[in-house]
Image (cartoon, rainbow, N blue to C red):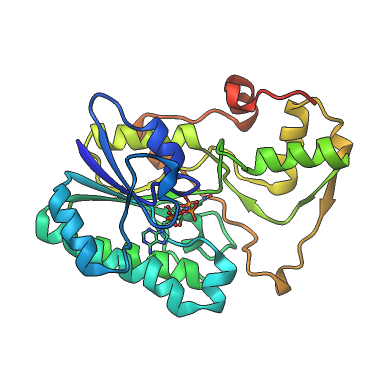
Amino acid sequence: MKILMTGATGYIGSELLRMLPDEENQIIPIGFSNTHIHENVRNVDLTDFIKTNQYIKSVSPDIILHLAGSKDMAKCEADKIFSRRINFEASENIISQCFENKIKLIYISTDAVFDGVHKHDELSVAVPTTQYGKDKLATENLIRNNLIDFVIVRIGGIFGTKNDFVDEVYTKLKREGNFHAYVNLINNPTYIGDLCNMLRIIIEKEHRGIFHCAGSESLSRYDFALKIAEHFNFDTSLIIPEELDLSKDIRLANLSMDCIQTYTTLNYYPQSISKILKSNSVFDRKA
Ligand SMILES: NC(=O)c1ccc[n+]([C@@H]2O[C@H](COP(=O)([O-])OP(=O)(O)OC[C@H]3O[C@@H](n4cnc5c(N)ncnc54)[C@H](OP(=O)(O)O)[C@@H]3O)[C@@H](O)[C@H]2O)c1
């Protein structure tokens, strides 16, 4: 498959660019301002629709794996036009290209399309409360209403990448001897290796529809930090529980996702966080 990957220079894209290509899948990566990260990355501003469309036509991909956007929730809230432009209008243009040229679209979406109150599954009605969540959901809806060959992949906070939460906790424990973690922010941390494996299955088996490709555990930042401390043999009392004042913060309390239907359809079951930390050399560090 010839896969055009947007957002290939980002936090997730740069890892997938390393992990996803194989004999079956050729990745054609595009970025925006950080194209130096990889020799093959082309600079295409997705908000320049004419240039984007010319580029898509010149590549003629089988699949567009669309990751590009801004996940900076505070910036999206403060500048709704900015958020709409990159998180919705750029996607709207890609959707129309997929429609016109019969390209499959795999769209990476987010747990932030939900209300942040309850756990949701693939069929739940999404009611976002932030601009970021609203623009991501608007893109999802446009895809569902206009394309047949599409996949919407919702994920939780990614780890297993450079500068992830594991790294943040480890570095702070090592340098400062403690880590303050919120007890009232819950999600399903998503290991990048699991995301990559699930994407491979989706591509190979030609799946369509909405998938929750997140990790198997819904837990608070505090509980995640405890597991990280335990893994690196730090004393877990160094993790200090803290409550975030959600009345003054844009972040959402409970972004947990039910993923059972996705795991069953893909026949792929992510390991627990403790097992992931133990079984991947990327998490080998000394306390
Ligand atoms: N990270 C997470 O934990 C997480 C969780 C849930 C959902 N997601 C979703 O996953 C996707 C990728 O997330 P990420 O963490 O990798 O984001 P990121 O690190 O912020 O990367 C964003 C990507 O979008 C590109 N981009 C920004 N503006 C662009 C433009 N005008 N034209 C073309 N490309 C542009 C950036 O290019 P340059 O860097 O070259 O400027 C970068 O490659 C996002 O859609 C996000 O909603 C992420």
Across and down, in percent, residue 90 comes to: 31, 66
Relative to residue 112, is residue 176 depicted above or below? above
Across and down, in percent, residue 221 comes to: 70, 48
Q: Quadrant of ligand 1?
A: bottom left
Relative to residue 87, is residue 268 depicted above or below? above
The structure residue drawn at horizontal position 36% and vertical position 29%, both measured from the top left corner, is 267
Across and down, in percent, residue 53 comes to: 18, 62
- Quadrant of res 273: top right
Q: Foreground: 144 or 86?
A: 86
Across and down, in percent, residue 117 comes to: 59, 63
The structure residue drawn at horizontal position 87% and vertical position 31%, both measured from the top left corner, is 235
Q: Foreground: 35 or 274?
A: 35
Relative to residue 210, is residue 1 depicted above or below? above
Where does the C terminus fall, quadrant-wise? top right
Where does the N terminus fall, quadrant-wise? top left
**Whether residue 95 can be seen here:** no
The structure residue drawn at horizontal position 65% and vertical position 28%, both measured from the top left corner, is 274
Relative to residue 41, is residue 200 depicted above or below? above
Residue 242 left/right relative to 136:
right
The structure residue drawn at horizontal position 33% and vertical position 65%, both measured from the top left corner, is 139
Residue 124 left/right relative to 275:
left
Q: How many marks?
A: 0
